[in-house]
Amino acid sequence: MAERRRILFLLLGLAVLAALFMAWRLGAPYGYIIRIRGIRLGALIATGAAVGAATVLFQAVTRNRLLTPGIVGFDALFVFVQTGLVFALGATSVAGLPPMAKFLAEAAVMAAAATGLFGLLLRRGAEDLLRMVLTGVILGVFLRGLSGLAARMLEPSEYAVVQQASAASFGAVDPAQLAIAGIVLLPVLGIALRLAPALDAAALGRTGARAVGMDYDRLVLGTLLLVAALVAVSTALVGPVTFLGLIAASLAQAVLPAQRHAALIPAAALIGAAILVAGQFVFERVLGLQSTLAVIVEFVGGLLFLFLVLRRSRP
């Protein structure tokens, strides 16, 4: 009952933030402004919820609260795709690509790469999780190196296009892309909630979970595929926000007394969405700034990561 009340409180808080975001200093032309704000609000909520839930799922199967899906190179892959497009086609051709086709291609590439990584490295069972994480880290470094090398060969104007495309931005989201993201994300989140009891049992580890009759390897692979879908679609929609999930998952674990995934998943999703909506409201409506939110989220998330590492390393 306490968990339900706290989740309802988080939902109410998100609703209040959304109302403030939509109504603050609303002026004419009302219809146009409401439409623009609604699209931006939808992108903020979808991205925050997807990244927050994905991080809880990833931490559940890795049994490590310091890890996020970004650790296996999702953000590096996204930057590599943007750099590769500009390097191969040129800035003018990339700017002329149909936005919907580009969005679908980016989401498909990231989802396929993650699925291939998970499937290849877990073919011998879920005990290969550590190897998967380490391989993801190495691949991320490799892709960042390739992106940096290609960026040095670009013209300054082309490099500016890469920088703009690689940074998370909530200001110019296509409504059709947002609709497709919602169509994908909502069922995935629903499946994640159905898996919540099994994820609680997965905390016993592979041996313990198999002792109670659970197909642990299948659960891990299925959960990682859900993570791949959530992160791929949200990243293709607005760009990478690596440490947002760590903040949302850590706050969800601090808010909820019982660490049941049936509560942790929606709590992290609501907190992730609330962080983005509140941050965008402050920077855009109150301070009049535009592209600062992602930088601040990454900075705070990096500090939280260091704090968690140092706290865990204490005797």
Image (tube, helix red, strand yellow):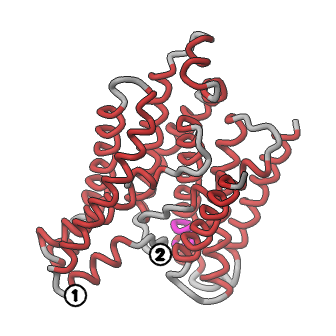
Q: Which mark is residue 171?
A: 2
Q: Residue furthest right?
A: 2
- The amino acid on which the numbered mark 1 sits, given as a three-letter code, is Ser
Residue at left offset 37%, top offset 54%: 73
| Lower sequence index among marks 2 and 1 | 1
Residue 203 in the magenta stretch? The answer is: no
- Asked if the residue under mark 1 is in contact with the one under mark 2, i.e. CB atoms within 8 Å, the reply is no
Residue at left offset 54%, top offset 32%: 191
- The amino acid on which the numbered mark 2 sits, given as a three-letter code, is Gly
Could you tell me if residue 270 is visible in this image? no
Which residues lie in the magenta part? 36-40
Label 2: few (<14), some or many (≥20) within 10 Å? some
Q: Position of residue 149 (x, y in %)?
A: 20, 73
Q: Quadrant of residue 162?
A: bottom left
Residue 37 in the magenta stretch? The answer is: yes
Above-or-below relation of 173 to 193: below
Q: How many marks?
A: 2
Q: Nearer the viewer, mark 2 or mark 1?
A: 1
Label 1: few (<14), some or many (≥20) within 10 Å? few
Q: Secondary structure at mark 2?
A: loop
Q: Residue furthest front?
A: 315
Q: Which mark is residue 157?
A: 1
- Per the model, the C-alpha gap separating discs 2 and 1 is 21 Å
Q: Which mark is residue 203?
A: none
Residue at left offset 75%, top offset 52%: 11
Q: Quadrant of residue 88?
A: bottom left
Q: Quadrant of residue 281?
A: bottom right
